[in-house]
Image (cartoon, helix red, strand yellow):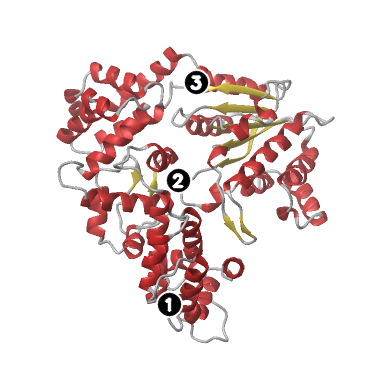
Amino acid sequence: MEGTRVQILCDIEAWISDLMAPQIFWLTGMAGTGKSAIALSVCKLVFGYEHILLGGSFFCSRSTGLSAQRDVRCVVPTLAQLLSLQSSEFAEALHSELNSNPNILQQQVGVQVDTLLYKPLLRLKDSLSTIVFVIDALDECGGQLSSNGTINDAETQVIVSDMLEALVKFSKYPIKLPVKFLVTSRPETHIRDTKVSDDKFSHVLRLHTVDKEQVAKDLRLYISTKLFASVTLKAQFSEADVDALVRFSDGLFIVAATALEHSLGADIELARARFNSILDPSRNRRIGAAAPLDRMYAVIVEDAAKFGKVGTDKLATLLRILAAVLSARMTLSLLALEDLLKLPIGKLRASMDSLHAVINVPDHDNDASLRPVHASFGDYLFGRASKHIRISESLGHEALAHGCLQVMATRLHFNVSQSRSSFEPNSIIKPSSITLSLEYACMQWIYHVSTVLELSDTGGNFRTRLLAWIGRTPRHSHQLMLDEKINKIIRPKLLFWLEVMSILGQVQRAAAMLTFAAATVR
């Protein structure tokens, strides 16, 4: 919002303009302090300057459902590609480097930074424009399934650390390039332990050290603008309400934004009730002395489930739905989620009716944009929520694993691609027979199954139900379970599954999935 974060943006603008300043600006702060909003504002800001070029931006995210936005290995290649689209000199130099090292994407990230960024950027060493790269939310990178197998979160953290150390080296090279990197993240240990946190190599701004009066002023401007946006709202809310929400937010912009979205997303009478519910001191005491973001999430989830009024069935259904949405590897539609969870769309919508502030629920059933609004919501439900609303990490994976297997068992069939002849190449248009739920099942089944097995010491309940579903007596062995699953579900329809993967252009991924399954099942 115009008029907010003015001093921070001025500081970043001054850093960009100062050729003697460090080439990295590390903006760090806890969840909800506005790091991504500032990063986006910087991207928009530099667009308006003649002598500043936005070389590229990469916004990491666990909440979009796009796997590439969670994969740290995509960051450097993406930035290189984006700059090559803007600079013919850089593109020519990058092309030369790729010819010399065609396997660069399989090499360590430090080598990628040198090959894809530093060496091609040498062509622009005399540029009059400062080139700015923005990398947001590096802490949101996680383990991903790739064509070469899997990387876990620990390996991801090593890659993030190595990439930051490689970027720091820009200031150590004898030729100083007109390049700046704005990096934002939470103050995670693996990031703090790199030289990016050293004032010698980075300009560091920790958002929790920003003047609290300035933060409160920005919050007050934002909240009052929203609460008094119409004559009707002005009649319902007062300056006292603005002050109350400023205090409740405690410096966290996401608290104010989510509280207003939750309250103002309803009709005016319900808006007042929801606003009061979030700020109700008696509820906050019952929830405990948690951070304001956690207290607000608790109120929203409990109100959505009408906890304590209609029993636990609705709550159990709601948590199962939330677990699936938070664990999904792609953004889904309500139609696809209905297919995977075997829940009617009406029930899905009814369960999530009060969750629009924390879950992006599309208006149209076939719109594939169902996702959490912010990654902190999943962090809360999986780790910090009260016992009665906490979600086990395996719940969503179990629901989706079961759903994927069921969808493939019922939807894979001869000529699923609707091809006229096996002698003709695949159509470039995905046929209607390959629905989003079938696409998701074929692409992600092994990820959810293997994750459930990893998260469970014995895997007892899930394995028992899964083995019972495929018609076999349960035995306490995950190797046997996977073997039985492949024999009873995947193997008989292997060619149909490969047909779908071929239509989706994912044959290499299919090979990696089969290799992974073969290595897991002895």
Examine the image and state in which quarter residue 513 appears.
bottom right
Any part of residue 350 in sight = yes
Residue 287's label in the rendered image is none
Residue 50 image position (x, y, % from top left): 63, 30
Residue occupied by mark 2: 63
Query: Sequence order check: which comes first, mark 2 or mark 1?
Result: 2
> Percent position (x, y) of residue 321?
32, 53
Q: Residue at x 49, y 78 (%)?
A: 487
Instruction: From the image, tell me which residue sits under label 1.
Output: 412
Q: Secondary structure at mark 1?
A: loop
Q: Secondary structure at mark 3?
A: helix
Classify 275 as above or below 327: above
C-alpha gap between disc 2 and disc 1: 29 Å
Q: The C terminus lies in which quarter of the figure? A: bottom right
Q: Is residue 363 above or below residue 444?
A: above
* Real-space CA distance between mark 2 and mark 3, rounded to the nearest whole angstrom: 24 Å
Question: What's the residue at 37%, 51% (across, down)?
Answer: 323
- Please name the amino acid that badge 2 sits on: Ser
Q: In front here: 406 or 199? A: 406
Give SS at disc 2. loop
Residue that label 3 marks: 208
